[in-house]
Image (cartoon, helix red, strand yellow):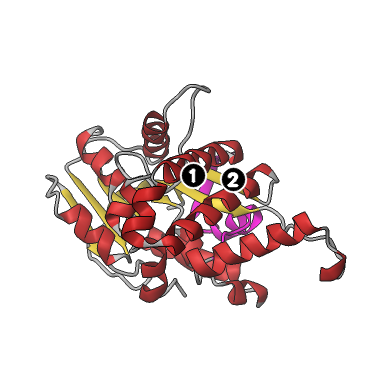
């Protein structure tokens, strides 16, 4: 099952104005890819969109689909920079869909829907999905051994919505390892207990109902629908991205506390600091894949 509408609202519907204070100017809420140490967040986010668009073999004549499109940063890039005539995005967040559609970009459409329930007769030549798969499998389902089947159904649905010869630029946050040795809770070092508490807080209070996949689960799940042509892990890039988000959030602390309250600031400060720590300690990583449809 995908995350519910209510869970998505917790994660993404705080306020578009709130997210605009600390994301980049296009409001990419996923990892950037940095080409050099001095590159800005804005330039690194554009680089990420270029990489995934290249993986999806985007050219002006292609009809493109963005699954989990957020506020439409990738769709905007596709229609303005890559010159595609039609790009469709799907998001379960009503606030994100309204924000993007209000801009009325030619050839761009954002649909507020659960992708796994969404149906359309339209077929797509290029697909991009950036960290949407994190909302497909709950922790409970993963513990029941259902993760690979859930992810495989997702790739099957993508396959069903594409034309022969389609390519897929795919990105996902990975869970690498749990910050816990095989000992009793009381025997854990205080720092390890805090790491566990912070990760649990992020999973329950910021992104309820979601779970990052493991690399090996993705490798299993793409078959028999897509072939992994190339794969890159970019753990350090996401650490740097979340670090920059945290810096910008703190620069706007006074505004955030006055408009949305102390709890919103403190929760997001804790969440972003947890992300920086998780990527630093290899609890989490990032995967980008170039996938080719198996016809």
Quarter residue 50 falls in: top left
Please give the label number shown on residue 137. Answer: none
SS under mark 2: helix
- Report if the CB atoms under discs 1 and 2 are less than 8 Å apart: yes
Indicate whether 81 appears above or below 106: above
Quarter residue 25 falls in: top left
Q: Give the residue at mark 1.
A: 246
How far across and down, in percent of the image, does residue 225 sit? 48, 57
SS under mark 1: helix
The answer to if 135 sits in the magenta stretch is: no
The residue sitting at 55% across, 55% down in the picture is 270
Q: Nearer the viewer, residue 14 or 173?
A: 14
The answer to if 230 sits in the magenta stretch is: yes
The residue sitting at 34% across, 50% down in the picture is 255
Query: Range of the magenta residues?
Result: 211-233
How far across and down, in percent of the image, does residue 104 sit? 12, 50
Instruction: Bin the neighbour count of mark 2 within 10 Å (Cα to Cα): few under 14, some 14-19, many 20 and up.
Output: many
């Amino acid at each position: 099952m995908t995350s519910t509408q209510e869970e998505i609202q917790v994660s993404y519907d705080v306020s578009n104005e709130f997210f605009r204070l600390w994301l980049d100017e296009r409001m990419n809420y996923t990892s950037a890819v940095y080409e050099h140490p001095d590159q800005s967040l804005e330039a690194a986010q554009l680089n990420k969109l270029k990489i995934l668009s290249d993986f999806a073999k985007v050219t002006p004549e292609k009809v493109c689909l963005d699954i989990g499109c957020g506020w439409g940063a990738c769709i905007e890039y596709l229609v303005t920079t890559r010159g595609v005539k039609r790009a469709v995005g799907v998001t379960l967040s009503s606030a994100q869909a309204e924000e993007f559609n209000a801009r009325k970009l030619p050839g761009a459409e954002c649909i507020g829907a659960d992708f796994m329930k969404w149906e359309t007769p339209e077929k797509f030549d290029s697909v991009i999905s950036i960290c949407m798969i994190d909302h497909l499998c709950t922790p409970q389902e993963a513990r029941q051994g259902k993760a690979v089947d859930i992810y495989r159904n997702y790739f099957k649905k993508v396959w069903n919505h594409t034309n022969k010869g389609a390519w897929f630029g795919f990105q996902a946050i990975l869970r690498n390892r749990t910050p816990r040795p095989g000992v009793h809770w009381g025997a854990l070092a205080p720092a390890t207990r805090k790491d566990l508490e912070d990760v649990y807080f992020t999973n329950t209070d910021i992104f309820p109902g979601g779970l990052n996949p493991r690399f090996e689960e993705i490798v299993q799940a793409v078959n028999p629908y897509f072939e992994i042509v190339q794969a890159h892990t970019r753990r350090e890039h996401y650490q740097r991205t979340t670090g920059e988000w945290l810096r910008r959030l703190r620069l706007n602390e006074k505004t955030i506390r006055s408009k949305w309250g102390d709890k919103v600031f403190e929760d997001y400060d804790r969440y972003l600091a947890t992300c920086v720590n998780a990527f630093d300690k290899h609890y989490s990583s990032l995967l980008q894949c170039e996938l080719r449809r198996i016809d």
